[in-house]
Image (cartoon, rainbow, N blue to C red):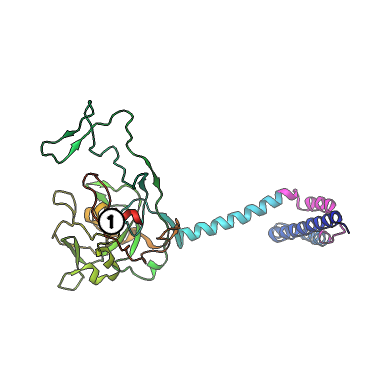
Amino acid sequence: MNLLQWYKTRKKRKAHKELAETIRSAIHYDRDILAPEQVEKLERLAEQAADPNGNVEQIEAKFSSVIGHDNTAHTICSVLDVLIVALTVAFGVRALFLQPFQIPTGSMQPTLFGNHYIDRNEAEPHLGPTAKMYLDVFGRDVTNPNGTEAIRYLRPGEIVCDGWLTSGDHLFVDRVSLHFKDFERGEIFIFTTEGLKYKGAALEGFFYIKRIAGMPGDTLKIVNNVLYVRPAGETQFKPVYEVAPRMKKLYSGKGGYHGHLPVAAEDWGVLKEGVEYKVPEDHYFALGDNSNNSLDSRYWGPVPRRNVIGRALNVFWPVSRRWGLIDTLDPLDVPTGSPRRDLPGSQMPSMRLQ
């Protein structure tokens, strides 16, 4: 047998095998709507199709006449059946077990990264249209009388920024375990913002991710950038890293971690310097690790348990230092540093090293 004959024989056997499988599938899927004599005819056709010496075209014609429609339509229906089942399983898993989630902001840096801007030159933060950097119509700097803030008008053709946006971390949310095990202080969780308001207005966005800093019944206060906790039933305040060891790295002063800042005295919020706040029952007090740039429970209060979606489980994209199980890394061994005073909204220098 030469190569051409071998190829034709192989192709014919494959066609017979596929036709036999198609007929058997038709019997399996349509048995409840087929008459007994139709089932009997299809079983004989399946046996004929399995015989390499049979005529595929004739068997296909008989198959179509028995089931009442052509083989192509039946194949499409079979594929659609499989697709519907697969989608049903996928959406069921997403709704009940594992839900994908994208970090929208930088409030959890450096533990988790959200969408952020990277400048082409030394990763300087984007000043944006709100930055007070202007020139007058002659291109001269205009400085306030106290000399602390330069106001400049941008000249035509001047480059405001040169860089790109990078998407945040993508992770899976465990939606099952919260029904069997309560949260612990220091865990990272995802919740909806339904019913949460700041300055009388609903919060932007629907899903938030933060770290649980206060449990139901806790009394909290911030003193010298340290969050103190008095758990329910106790009389003494303790630094949060003593009652929640996993939060100790937030006070390391390394890799971008810088403790917890209070709400400014003039701002709207519930946790200002030295002010005590008791977390209501069935609520959690949620803080961002990057409290220098985080809108969290310090401002809009605690999260009701009914809003909780689940636990943050693992980062599946991108493949970076943070890939894998969440919140298992030690901080980078570099000083956190301070934001640049001349760049409003800038971040700690060590954030760029993540």
Residue at 33% x, 29% y is 157
- Asked which quadrant contains residue 42, the reply is bottom right
Mark 1 = which residue?
290
The local secondary structure at tag 1 comes to loop
Residue 65 in the magenta stretch? The answer is yes
What is the x, y in percent for residue 255?
30, 60
Q: For the view shown, which residue lies furthest in the bottom direction?
A: 234
Check if residue 342 falls in the magenta segment: no
Q: State which quadrant residue 24 falls in.
A: bottom right
Whole-percent x and y of residue 354?
Answer: 36, 57
Say how many tags the image has. Answer: 1
From the viewer's perspective, tell me whether residue 64 is left or right of residue 331. Answer: right
Task: Name the outermost residue toward the top.
Answer: 138
In the foreground, 256 or 10 = 256
**Quadrant of res 46:** bottom right
- Quadrant of the snapshot with the N terminus: bottom right
Can you give x and y, in whole percent of width and height, for residue 109 in the image?
32, 56
What's the magenta bit mostly, secondary-structure-wise? helix
Whether residue 147 is visible here, answered yes or no, is: yes
Which region of the structure is painted magenta? 48-72
In the picture shown, does residue 214 fall above or below 15?
A: below
Residue 217 seen in render? no
Image location (x, y in percent) of residue 117: 35, 46
Q: Amino acid at mark 1?
A: Asn
Along the line of sight, the residue nearer the viewer: 304 or 273: 273
Q: Residues within 10 Å of mark 1 (few under 14, many from 20)?
A: many
